[in-house]
């Protein structure tokens, strides 16, 4: 059995992480519960980002499916 590092739409994990890293420093709308704006501080993995808001500077782990560009 061969393992494949392909994760999303045929792209390798390393390529996905590089694409996500381009978002660091960007402001996004988080739609998890009450919507809030935050800044992407880091990439955790292929799905999750570390995002902090002005009201709560401690970074939170947020799924990429819960963020929108502003």
Image (cartoon, helix red, strand yellow):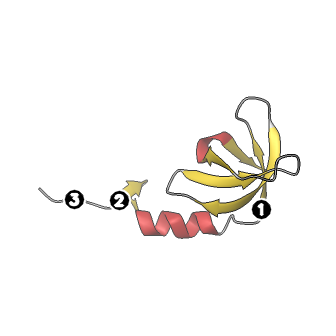
Q: Which residue is mark 3?
A: 3
Specify whether 23 is left or right of 46: right
Q: Residue at x 77, y 62 (%)?
A: 26
In this picture, is 40 found above or below 66? below
**Label 3 crowd (10 A; few <14 / some 14-19 / many >=20):** few
Indicate the quadrant where residue 6 lies. Answer: bottom left
Residue 26 marker:
1
Q: Between residue 35 and residue 58, name the one nearer to us.
A: 58
Mark found first going from the N terminus, 2 or 1:
2
Quadrant that contains the N terminus: bottom left
Q: Which residue is mark 2?
A: 6
Percent across and percent down for residue 35 are 80, 35
CB under 8 Å between discs 3 and 2:
no
Secondary structure, mark 2, is strand
Pick whichever, 48 or 10, lies toward us: 48
How far apart, in angstroms, are the residues tagged by discs 2 and 1? Answer: 26 Å
Q: Secondary structure at mark 1?
A: loop
3D distance between C-alphas at marks 3 and 1 = 34 Å
């Amino acid at each position: 059995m061969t393992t494949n590092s392909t994760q999303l739409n045929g792209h390798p994990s390393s390529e996905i992480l590089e694409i996500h890293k381009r978002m660091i420093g960007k402001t996004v709308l988080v739609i998890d519960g009450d919507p809030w704006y935050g800044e992407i501080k880091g990439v955790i993995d292929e799905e999750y980002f570390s995002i902090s808001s002005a009201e709560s500077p401690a970074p939170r782990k947020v799924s990429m499916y819960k963020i929108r560009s502003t």
